[in-house]
Amino acid sequence: MSFWQEHFKEICSFITPLLIAGVKYLLRGKVKLRYIVAHDFTFLVNEPRLDAQGNVLQPNQMVHTRSHVLKNFGSKSAEKVRVTFNYKPQYLNVWPPREFEQRFDDNRRYIMVIDNLMPKEPLTIEALSINAQLPDVLSVRHESGLGAVQGMSIYPAVPKWRIGLAMVAMFLGAMTVVYWLIELGMYVAAKP
């Protein structure tokens, strides 16, 4: 028996996951735009709100802040990203700083148009409002589809060596499953 005949199953079980991973890598090329509300807080400022004559309208003021984070998790650039707010926020800040176009639709909804969002690129939109509620984000779209709301949770950071160890274990497990399938196929094929 030659080396190839003797170790055919092991070689196939090693190569098959690599081929599948390679095909999957080559076929991906989609925009995966996600957005979250990363921060939403109301500050109670103990400073009176005054009118033009100096009369106290309110004994304190409310400052509302909200952080919206957009990120393209895909491998293709998201073109013409449109973020639609219910109305224009009093104050708006975009980080990292970049140019964007401001529009209003027929219903006076405020729309931010960002030329593109590269793969894995995050964009944070900070809104601030004093003594008024902040507008909600009604939709996030790009040229070829809709952005999806992403849930957010806090979890502890995992060391890279643990992630690497888990990836090696999953790869070995996939190779073992392929090996068993080849064994099963050879057993079934050898039965009269």
Image (cartoon, rainbow, N blue to C red):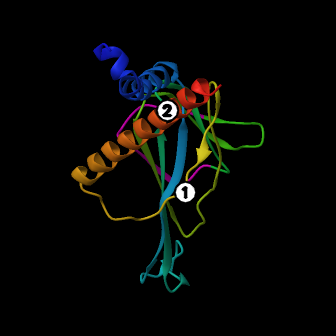
Residue 140 against residue 12 in the figure, above or below: below
Residue corresponding to mark 2? 183
Quadrant hosting residue 122: top left
| Residue occupying image coordinates x 54% and y 37% | 33
Residue 166 point in image, percent of width and height: 33, 50
Residue placed furthest toward the front = 192
Please tell me whether mark 2 sits on a helix, a strand or a loop.
helix
Residue 95 against residue 40 in the figure, above or below: above
- Which residue type carries mark 2? Glu
Residue corresponding to mark 1? 151
Quadrant hosting residue 16: top left
Q: Tell me the mark number nearer the camera, choosing from 1 and 2.
A: 2
Residue placed furthest toward the bottom = 59
Quadrant location of the N terminus?
Answer: top left
Residue 89 lies in magenta, yes or no?
yes
**Residue 20 numbered mark, or none:** none
| Residue occupying image coordinates x 41% and y 26% | 9
Residue 19 point in image, percent of width and height: 43, 21
Q: Nearer the viewer, residue 57 or 69?
A: 69
